[in-house]
Image: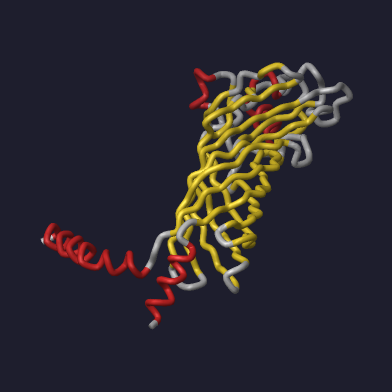
Amino acid sequence: MKRIRIFVLFLAFVIAAPTLLHAQIIKGEVFAGGILSQVDGDECYGFKRIGVHAGAGALIPLTSWMDVGLEVLFSQKGAYKRDTLVSNSTYPYAYNLRLNYVEVPLMLYLTDKDAVSFGIGASYGRIVYLNEQNNHISTGIGLGDGQLHWKDAEHADRLPDITHVTDINDLSTIVHNTYADTIGIAEVIDNSTTYRANDFNICADLRVRLWEGLHAELRYQYSLRPIRTRMFYSDAALTQPNQIRQQYNNTITLRLVYIFNERRSKANKESMKQ
């Protein structure tokens, strides 16, 4: 019975598909631009990492003023600072983080007077390249869960869960309750040495038509969950942790968008109204 229902639905789709495709012509898109990015929570302030943004996508018309967009993008993100990385430190510390992602945003666009579009949606990203340098020396960081861990990995399953601790005082209490009061955090806790491979973002767009199918677009994105949880220290030897911070991608993208089939799609909508 279930197979019969599936077959009937498939047959109905095959019959209706030509009419649907005639009514809604999918518009193709290509993107090229640049990204200004920072990683909130890394002690490096400002959108100082400049990256490349490029890709392609499709716009599926829902109404004369509403479209759904699906994109596949390459985006270079990260952080950059030339002076100090460690909070409350007095020594110079250069920092350079590169996070290259392949992203798949799903957007809903609302268009006003066929000239200005407002978009909102969500994006899934996967890291395809990662490099982090402190003072021009690679840290050897990799991909993983991006969390703090006990150094005693052999007995980690019997130790308190610290993966959701975000306050240094709470972590200190856990350490002191687990070990002797004389043991410090840095002696028993490993700082996170990984970034999460997957990143989920909220996206907001403003798109303005420049000429026929050419548009300029400004996009803002922010991570919905931390890409890493990290301890920061007050000394160069990294023995005195003073805070825990969760890190998030924070980006501004300015790009040019060229849309194919716009005239045909618009003419098709008008003909369907007659």
Rendered location of residue 213, percent (x, y):
55, 59
Rendered location of residue 153, percent (x, y):
53, 20
Q: Quadrant of residue 217 in the image?
A: bottom right
How many callouts does the rendering have? 0
Q: Residue at position x 43%, y 61% from top?
A: 60
Would you say residue 153 is visible in this rendering? yes
Q: Nearer the viewer, residue 33 or 243?
A: 33
Rendered location of residue 232, percent (x, y):
74, 29
| Color scheme of the displayed model | secondary structure
Q: Residue at position x 53%, y 33% from top?
A: 127
Q: Nearer the viewer, residue 208 or 218?
A: 208
Lateral position of residue 242 relative to residue 207, left or right: right
Q: Quadrant of residue 206 in the image?
A: bottom right
Rendered location of residue 162, percent (x, y):
59, 33
Would you say residue 168 is visible in this rendering? no
Lateral position of residue 168 relative to residue 205, left or right: right
The correct choice, above or below, for 90 with respect to 52 in the image is: above
The correct choice, above or below, for 214 with respect to 84 in the image is: below
Q: Nearer the viewer, residue 139 or 260?
A: 260
Q: Nearer the viewer, residue 50 or 161?
A: 50
The correct choice, above or below, for 28 with respect to 47 in the image is: below
Instruction: Assign the N terminus to one quadrant of the image.
Output: bottom left
- For this orientation, the residue located farthest to the right is 90
Q: Residue at position x 63%, y 38% from top?
A: 52
Lateral position of residue 54 relative to residue 42, left or right: left
Instruction: Assign the C terminus to one quadrant of the image.
Output: bottom left
